[in-house]
């Protein structure tokens, strides 16, 4: 049987990294995600699996350590919170360009700037619409439980290597700081160079044998004709991810007149709102995007002609609501409700907003 | 069954660890649990609180605006949370340092002299377990053998010799809790 523990989201993610067979973690502390590196430092995974953990001198150093180790085909992870992720974006763009797999966790806090250390979801645009420069996408997983904080580590690595692209776990301070029951995954062995080549092909800088030409890891091509071919190749990968990797959860949508769309902490709150609304006689459902990119457009579009309206519930000024609108294509009313600055809406707040913005407007 | 609890007081009273022990006890009886603390600047104001949910079903929101039970250990927390107890719910508090006592008539109100009893036990750190005992007397949501397992899980092994002391403190709380206003809707089990 799997081991069951009571853990913070941040700790569960750190333990899951060890158990996923990660080769290294490079990070720099920042509230509210410092427990990730704290846990790894206390746990000393080099004694358990040989996994290396290093506190870098800055976020910039950390992401470039990830770049270097991941270019050698290693399973590497970093984590930070919003302002720290902004610092890492250059490296993330480079890795997307150089087709380097890695896992980045953002335990979001309110912004912009240093903002606040309380939870936020205002990095949705940053995660899903680029953030760094150039035409690239980040596969973005949004956990809403401590269990998912653990489970999405292995899934994130799997997707990163499948598409040779950085993957982001987009969480927030509430899930990072709260404790829940978590079933820890079993320990996976770390991969050898030969196993990496067998599983994912020989693209990494694992040492040049006679049998092949040099592997070059770079995001630079000065010839525009060649760079465009590279761009087209990247876009084909992103298209494949859009077709194959959409993940979402649907709760009580079958008979719904109104559908809430929410991820992460907002989705947990919205689940309660579905119960409260149904107790009052409103038929309300919830669609919870698990992948924020690729966004579950079709599952939302499916209900566009059936419902009276959608409410996008987010801890920001209205970001995901734009993707909901794109999915709905004007066929239904789409409204947004959000709190900012580190404020977390209560279930009662969301229910009031639903009544005011959608139900009483009809 | 779902029990939504807020535990609130000063930092250092053991609020967060009481919540953790309750949550671990819930896990020991196969329940779903969540433990959502205040963190950061909220705590630097001197107050600490944690929302703990134990449920036989999947827990939806860990963030709540009303609670089945409020365990209140200072005046600021009384001011903030008295109105957030659901009608028919329970408010348990330590009257030590409370200037404005709760006045609601639609909830059960109970007191435990936690600080006083902890002094009598000559160990101030037993305070939170005395209060937890008082709560479990009124709402026996976790069985004592599961509390024992919960203590084993939440305390590091070097502190396991303290478990009997903690269990004695729980018993003191159970013996000394006083119901001030009884709605009779809550079954008191012995």
Image (spheres, rainbow, N blue to C red):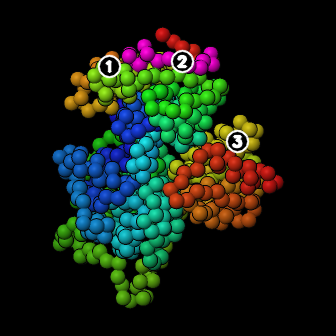
Labels 2 and 1 within one chain = yes
Q: Is residue A14 left or right of residue A49?
A: right
Q: Nearer the viewer, mark 2 or mark 1?
A: 1
Q: Which residue is mark 3?
A: A277
Q: CA distance from mark 1 to mark 3?
A: 49 Å
Residue at 59%, 20% (x, y): give it. B181
Q: CA distance from mark 2 to mark 3?
A: 34 Å
Nearest the eye: A347 or A255: A347
Q: Which residue is mark 1?
A: B120
Circle 3 packing at 10 Å, graded few (<14), some (14-19), many (20+), is many
Q: CA distance from mark 2 to mark 1?
A: 21 Å
Q: Nearer the viewer, mark 2 or mark 3?
A: 2
Q: Is residue A245 left or right of residue A182?
A: right
Question: Quick check: can you spot residue B148?
Answer: no
Circle 1 packing at 10 Å, graded few (<14), some (14-19), many (20+), is few
Using the image, determine if residue B187 lies above or below residue A46.
above
Mark 3 secondary-structure assignment: helix
Nearest the eye: A211 or A244: A244
Using the image, determine if residue A197 lies above or below residue A188.
below
Mark 2 secondary-structure assignment: strand
Residue A139 drawn at (x, y percent): 46, 62
Residue A157 drawn at (x, y percent): 37, 56
Circle 2 packing at 10 Å, graded few (<14), some (14-19), many (20+), is some
Residue at 23%, 73% (x, y): give it. A212
Residue at 36%, 45% (x, y): give it. A12
> Disc 2: which chain?
B
Question: Quick check: can you spot residue A46?
Answer: yes
> Disc 3: which chain?
A
Closer to the chain start, of discs 2 and 1, is 1
Residue B179 drawn at (x, y percent): 54, 18
Q: Which residue is mark 2?
A: B179
Magenta residues (range):
B170-184
């Amino acid at each position: 049987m799997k081991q069951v523990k009571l853990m913070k989201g941040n700790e569960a993610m750190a333990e899951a990294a060890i158990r996923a067979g990660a080769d290294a973690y490079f990070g720099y502390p920042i509230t509210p995600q410092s427990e990730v590196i704290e846990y790894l430092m206390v746990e000393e995974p080099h004694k358990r699996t040989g996994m290396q953990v290093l506190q870098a001198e800055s976020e910039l150093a950390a992401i470039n350590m990830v770049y270097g180790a991941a270019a050698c085909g290693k399973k590497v992870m970093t984590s930070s919170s919003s302002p720290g992720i902004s610092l890492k974006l250059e490296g993330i763009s480079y890795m997307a360009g150089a087709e380097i797999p890695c896992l980045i966790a953002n335990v979001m806090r309110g912004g912009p700037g240093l903002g606040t250390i309380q939870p936020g979801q205002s990095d949705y645009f940053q995660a899903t619409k680029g953030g760094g420069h150039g035409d690239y996408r980040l596969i973005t997983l949004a956990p809403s439980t401590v269990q998912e904080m653990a489970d999405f580590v292995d899934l994130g690595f799997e997707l990163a290597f499948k598409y040779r692209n950085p993957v982001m776990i987009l969480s927030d301070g509430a899930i990072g700081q709260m404790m829940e029951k978590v079933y820890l995954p079993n320990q996976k062995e770390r991969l050898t160079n030969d196993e990496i080549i067998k599983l994912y092909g020989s693209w990494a800088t694992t040492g040049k044998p006679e049998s092949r030409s040099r592997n070059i890891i770079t995001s630079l091509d000065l010839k525009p004709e060649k760079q465009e071919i590279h761009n087209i190749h990247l876009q084909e990968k992103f298209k494949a991810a859009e077709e194959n990797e959409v993940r979402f959860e649907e709760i009580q949508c079958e008979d719904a007149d109104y559908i809430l769309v929410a991820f992460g902490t907002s989705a947990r709150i919205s689940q309660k709102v579905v119960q409260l609304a149904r107790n009052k006689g409103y038929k309300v459902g919830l669609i919870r995007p698990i992948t924020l990119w690729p966004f579950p457009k079709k599952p939302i579009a499916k209900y566009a002609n059936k419902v009276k309206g959608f409410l996008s519930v987010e801890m920001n000024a209205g970001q995901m609501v734009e993707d909901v609108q794109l999915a709905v294509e004007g066929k239904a009313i789409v409204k947004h409700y959000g709190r900012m600055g580190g404020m977390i809406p209560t279930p009662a707040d969301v229910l009031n907003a639903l009544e005011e913005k959608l139900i009483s407007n009809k | 069954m779902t029990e939504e609890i807020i535990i609130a007081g000063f930092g250092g009273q053991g609020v967060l660890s009481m919540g953790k022990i309750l949550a671990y006890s819930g896990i020991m009886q196969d329940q779903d649990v969540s433990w959502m603390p205040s963190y950061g600047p909220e705590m630097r104001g001197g107050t600490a609180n944690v929302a703990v949910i134990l449920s036989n079903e999947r827990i939806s929101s860990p963030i709540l605006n009303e609670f089945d039970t409020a365990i209140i250990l200072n005046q600021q927390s009384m001011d903030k949370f008295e109105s957030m107890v659901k009608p028919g719910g329970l408010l348990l508090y330590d009257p030590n340092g409370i200037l404005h006592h709760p006045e609601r008539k639609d909830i059960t109100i109970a007191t435990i002299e936690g600080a006083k009893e902890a002094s009598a036990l000559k160990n101030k750190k037993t305070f939170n377990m005395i209060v937890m005992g008082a709560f479990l007397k009124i709402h026996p949501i976790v069985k004592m053998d599961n509390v024992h397992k919960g203590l084993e899980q939440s305390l590091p092994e070097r502190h396991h010799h303290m478990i009997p002391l903690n269990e004695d403190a729980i018993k003191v709380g159970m013996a000394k809790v006083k119901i001030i206003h009884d709605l009779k809707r809550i079954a008191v089990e012995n």
